[in-house]
Image (cartoon, grey):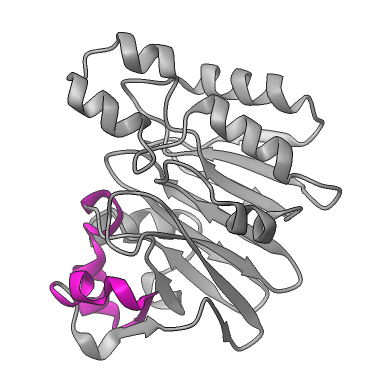
Amino acid sequence: MKAIILGSGSKGNSTLLITDTKKILIDVGFSYPKTKLILEKYNYKPSDIDFVLITHSHKDHIAGLASFIKREKKFVYIPKGMYKEINKIVNPDYIIPVVSKTFMIDDLKITLLPTSHDAVASVGFLIEDSKSLVYMTDTGYISKSNLSLMHDKNLYILESNHDVKMLMEGPYPYILKQRVVSDSGHLSNEMTGNYLKELIGIDTKEIVLAHLSETNNTEELALKTVNDILNTDIEVQAARQESELVVNV
């Protein structure tokens, strides 16, 4: 299993996941030309994508979705509660609303992990074949039911959005600061570290911190905070907004 994070942050999010049998685009937060350009850097084409998964309907996760589907005519799998939002921008012929929590696409098992973000039917994903990936950004907390499903997976791509001190002392207006730290906001570095400490196990190979705030966090601070909490030999990396990150497990 390989993940190529095309970019991660408030300006756009998208990840190419390559499994034994499938190539999956998780979120399409960049324009079609930019997505195409990045994919081609790694010798992939948009037409190589088998299907698309969407975490939620905020612009930084779906900005390029309509154009991508119009050009490539790929199916988009979404929680059924997200249908009204995605139907506004994508031809319904290419939308597949998922009714069950877990579904199969050939040999690939995909589990929806409902998140607490302030978006309709927001989710993360647990994707499994011979390897396993947890992909979760944009959530204010991780529920106990999700934590039990997420335990001891090979690769975690998990939000580490902000440092609380930087946020509270920073330029955001008070109401926005309260949104970020609320249950419907984002995970802080410390929260992410503590969740990961509970989650990682003997099969965990790689951790990627995602969706770092450019205003309220730094890559160095996120990595230090999480590494200090984990105290593990597992490699922890940070995804960036303006460059790609390739991870193999």
Estimate the x, y position of residue 3 in percent, counting from the top left.
57, 56
Extreme-right residue of the structure: 202
Q: Quadrant of the C terminus?
A: bottom right
Residue 42 falls left or right of residue 33:
right
Q: At x 25% / y 76%, what residue is drawn?
A: 83
User: Which of the 4 image quadrants contains residue 179?
Assistant: top left
Question: Is residue 248 visible from the viewing direction of this image?
Answer: no
Residue 27 falls left or right of residue 110:
left
User: Which of the 4 image quadrants contains residue 121?
Assistant: bottom left
Estimate the x, y position of residue 154 in percent, counting from the top left.
73, 54
Q: At x 43% / y 78%, what residue is drawn?
A: 51
Tell whether position 76 is magenta: yes
Q: How many marks?
A: 0
Residue 210, above or below 173: below
Extreme-top residue of the structure: 169
Q: At x 28% / y 27%, what residue is drawn?
A: 178
Tell whether position 137 is magenta: no
Front-most of residues 144 and 74: 144
Residue 54, above or below 198: below
Estimate the x, y position of residue 102 in percent, counting from the top left.
56, 78
Residue 213 falls left or right of residue 244:
left
- Provide the residue span drawn in magenta: 59-88
Front-most of residues 49 and 226: 226
Q: Quadrant of the N terminus?
A: bottom right
Front-most of residues 19 and 107: 107
Q: Main secondary structure of the magenta part?
A: helix
Residue 230, above or below 52: above
Estimate the x, y position of residue 172 in percent, counting from the top left.
21, 19
Question: Is residue 128 visible from the viewing direction of this image?
Answer: yes
